[in-house]
Image (tube, grey):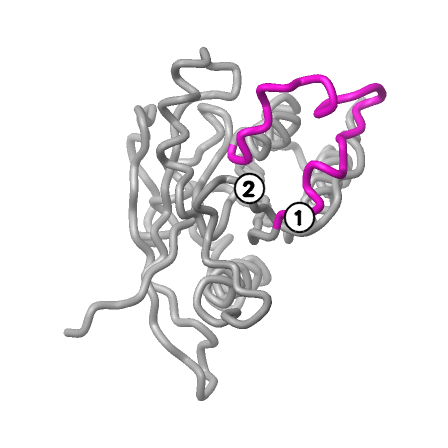
Amino acid sequence: MASLDRVKVLVLGDSGVGKSSLVHLLCQNQVLGNPSWTVGCSVDVRVHDYKEGTPEEKTYYIELWDVGGSVGSASSVKSTRTVFYNSVNGIILVHDLTNKKSSQNLYRWSLEVLNRDSVPTGVLVMNGDYDQEKFADNQIPLLVIGTKLDQIHETKRHEVLTRTAFLAEDFNAEEINLDCTNPRYLAAGSSNAVKLSRFFDKVIEMRYFLRDGNQIPGLPDRKRFWGGTFKNLHYD
């Protein structure tokens, strides 16, 4: 069997948000029975059919790099983590819908990948505004995934999902909210499955097909990111 081309996607977010459970669900289509803390980085592979059902259909490997730790870690831990940030083609930002802090920290995770969080002033400024110029030239696909949807009471879901929708807007990314213990949230043909497929297609396109003036061969020096602009932290 011929080897498949592959892309590298980082899975980032605070400890305990469910990254390992998410990656297992994405790659094995099964619920992870006994999730444990990730030390360093864990890598799993998903097989993805690019542009499925079209004449351009082609199968790729999606490497999902589940990076452990937290954005509040000591500088020595952060510097160790940066080895995982080389040659990145896409990023999945994961937060716990029941934990506002994990949602806010996605901004810090994104900045860490860009190696810019060493200068806190000018990154997070008055009223929660981010310095938009720091992201002007960055062009790497992003997907925002909220976990533990099952733990939010139905009477509170609209309020919570309205608040977290601003995350996707700020990152110029699509948003998926799910329960990692229930595979139906990613069932074939569902809106979440369509968003996920569209994200992986975009990652592949940026890696393999935009080779003329707009070629983006990954993130070798941690200086590229998705080309949107950051607005505000929309939290009380």
Chief SS of the magenta region: loop
Residue on which disc 2 sits: 223
Seen at 46% across and 58% down, the residue is 217
Residue 94: percent from the left, percent from the top? Answer: 53, 37
Secondary structure beneath dot 2 equals loop
Q: Quadrant of residue 99?
A: top right
Which numbered tag is attached to residue 155? none
Q: Is residue 5 left or right of residue 222?
A: left
Q: Quadrant of residue 35?
A: top left
Q: Is residue 221 left or right of residue 145?
A: left
Q: Quadrant of residue 47?
A: bottom left
Q: Are marks 2 and 1 in contact (CB under 8 Å)?
A: yes
Q: Would residue 100 be counted in the magenta stretch?
A: no
Which numbered tag is attached to residue 137? 1
Which of the two residues, 159 or 78, is positioned nearer the viewer here?
78
The CA distance from mark 2 to mark 1 is 8 Å
